[in-house]
Amino acid sequence: MVILAKINSTTATIPFIKEPMRTHYRYHPEYDIRNLSALPTGPGCRFLVCILGENGTLIAKRWSRKRPVLYSPVEVGIEFPQ
């Protein structure tokens, strides 16, 4: 199931998300996260800030140890398991 969400007059889709559009989600293996290997990782980082891309892709922006503050309406926080 694909949910369509309005974000700044553009339509974004994130596959495998069944609840209404939020800013933070738990990690799911089906998420298409790009640019993940280009980011440096540190010990204890379990939140990933992503930007919504085209066709339901998520583009990794930065890691965070605490629940991140999202500065843009197109940013999404992904929480990874410990």
Image (cartoon, rainbow, N blue to C red):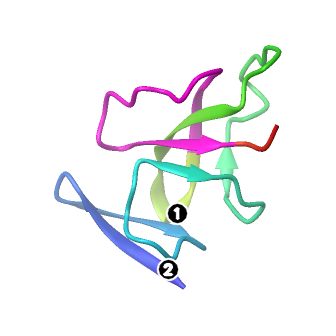
Q: Write down the region rendered in magenta.
A: 59-79
* Residue under the point 37% across and 63% down: 21
**Quick check: 82 above or below 12?**
above
Give the crowd class for mark 2: few <14, some 14-19, many >=20 residues within 10 Å.
Answer: few
For the N terminus, the image quarter is bottom right
Q: x%, y% of residue 72?
A: 31, 34
Q: Does the magenta stretch include residue 61?
A: yes
**Quick check: 2 above or below 25?**
below
Front one among 45 and 56 = 45
Mark 1 lies on residue: 56
**Quick check: 11 above or below 63?**
below
| Relative horizontal placement of residue 75, taking residue 9 as reference (left or right) | right
Q: Which mark is residue 77?
A: none
Q: Earlier in the sequence, mark 2 or mark 1?
A: 2
For the C terminus, the image quarter is top right
Residues at circles 2 and 1 in contact by the CB criterion of under 8 Å: yes
Q: x%, y% of residue 50?
A: 53, 39
Mark 2 lies on residue: 2
Give the residue type at disc 2. Val
Give the residue type at disc 1. Gly
Q: How far apart are marks 2 and 1 (CA)?
A: 9 Å
